[in-house]
Image (cartoon, rainbow, N blue to C red):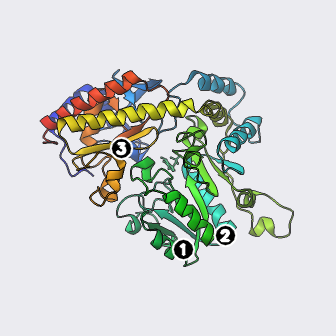
Amino acid sequence: MSTITVSQDLIAAYAGQFAGSQKRFDQARASLAGGIAHDGRYLKPFPLYIDHADGAYKWDVDGNKLIDYAIGHGSLILGHSDPEVTAAMHEQLDRGTHYSAGHEMEIRWAEQVQQMIPSAGLVRFTASGTEANLLAMRLARAYTGRPGILKFDGHFHGWSDYLIKGEKPPFENSHQPGVPGDVLRTVAVLPPDDLGALEERLTQGDIAAIMVEPSGASWSMIPLPDDFLQNVREIATRQNVVLLFDEVITGFRWAPGGAQERFGVMPDMTTLAKILAGGMPGGAVAGKAEIMEHLLFKDEQGWNATKKVGHPGTFNGNPLAATAGSMCLKRCENPEVQQHCDSMAAKLRTGLNTVLENEGIDGCAWGESSVFHIILGHRCMNRTAADLRSPEGIDPATLKSSGKSGLGNPLALAMALEGVDLFNAGGLLSVKHEEQDIDFTIEAFTNSIARLRSGRFLA
Ligand code: PMP
């Protein structure tokens, strides 16, 4: 994966401090394919194995304490083991974890989504974000009678056969081992900065839905052009195509009502997961009633056989996930949750950029709302997101592949040695990340830069 050889000193220090994780990784590989359960957890020479977590921290099997910026892949906006969420879950555990039937928690959960997400007409729960997007695509196709889906360079919508296309460079041309070409041909991938190409592609008349990460690809890693969401909204309306915001990350994080509330642009459908389920597995599709009604059984002649969209799923609306999710959403209604996370992230991005500036290193920390990304070794003039989109900016393919390849991997090792767990050369914040954690992280970054310099990764 990486074209850079990780310095032996850095590897030796990492292997020494995290010896227990190396042992677990060697053991894991005999039973778990690749020793991991998620590609995003891959790290050379081995990933960390965690023993327990609390608030903004987690402790590995060797007892090393790390500030956690992966924070449940972004799902734990309240931090690990929030007392209210945990208590509600304990109570639910004693009442059963699966009823194979409807229950009051799923009604309450759906009502909360409806109240918080401005464009949510009706809601249907799934077991993950990937499943939410699968269902949303099926609904959009049934509603419009068209087969195609249009997405944008680098935007991540889960690992389904359809939407994995275009997630990594070379975007539109990406080959996906194991995915039939016929499936890939139903998905069009366009750059987000060519509205003319978008309009033109839609005139072919085969597209059911336009899917967008409203933050820009991978939680603002590839920033969107100004007014992009508004422009796409207008185009989708004009061309009669469903506009879907994938708010799996941004939902309840960018604002209590997600990116659509923050930016004031309403999609026709929204997919949710992560924070939605308060750290438990779960997802949802929320959308206009006229689209969502394709899930309904009807007495109307022929409807159930030809119009109704099928949607089973053993863990849809699971009581334990509903309980955790409902408690989490109740807390996320208070905008102080998002304000705290946003302000800590802004302080962190500024601090990281100051380190780069002081050390005279090419690179940049950027991001929106309560997330951050770091790229090293690339010139970024004013160290802002706007720079990345400027004509001299860093091209989207480079941004997208900067995480675990390039300097991302050695940076992750160095930061772990300094007590910080990054997530894909960046991270997401929670209400439990406080000023002192940000100061600690900035110092850890300064020390990591020194480690990377002494390993000759950086001049
Ligand atoms: N959409 C976005 C924007 C995501 O970030 C993710 C997960 N990182 C998904 C969809 C897929 O969600 P899940 O991992 O729950 O399947």
Please name whichever residue, 16 or 210, is drawn nearer the observer in this view of the structure.
210
| Residue assigned mark 1 | 202
Q: From the image, state whether disc 3 or disc 2 is nearer to you.
A: 3
Q: Position of residue 352 (x, y in %)?
A: 30, 35
Which quadrant holds residue 245? Answer: bottom right
Q: Quadrant of the C terminus?
A: top left
State left or right for residue 91 relative to residue 206: right
User: Callout 2, which amino acid?
Assistant: Thr
Q: Secondary structure at mark 1?
A: helix
The CA span between labels 3 and 2 is 38 Å
Please name whichever residue, 315 or 231, is drawn nearer the observer in this view of the structure.
231
Q: Can residue 256 be seen at all in this image of the molecule?
A: yes
Q: Residue at x 46, y 59 (%)?
A: 164
Identify whether 102 is placed above or below 194. Answer: above
| Disc 1 residue: CB within 8 Å of ligand 1 | no
Q: From the image, state whether disc 2 or disc 1 is nearer to you.
A: 1
| Residue assigned mark 3 | 366
State left or right for residue 254 relative to residue 357: right
State left or right for residue 101 relative to residue 45: right
Q: Earlier in the sequence, mark 2 or mark 1?
A: 2
Q: From the image, state whether disc 1 or disc 3 is nearer to you.
A: 3
Q: Secondary structure at mark 3?
A: strand
Which quadrant holds residue 301? Answer: bottom right
How crowded pointer 1 is (Cα within 10 Å; few <14, some 14-19, many 20+) is rated as many
The CA span between labels 2 and 1 is 13 Å
| Residue assigned mark 2 | 144
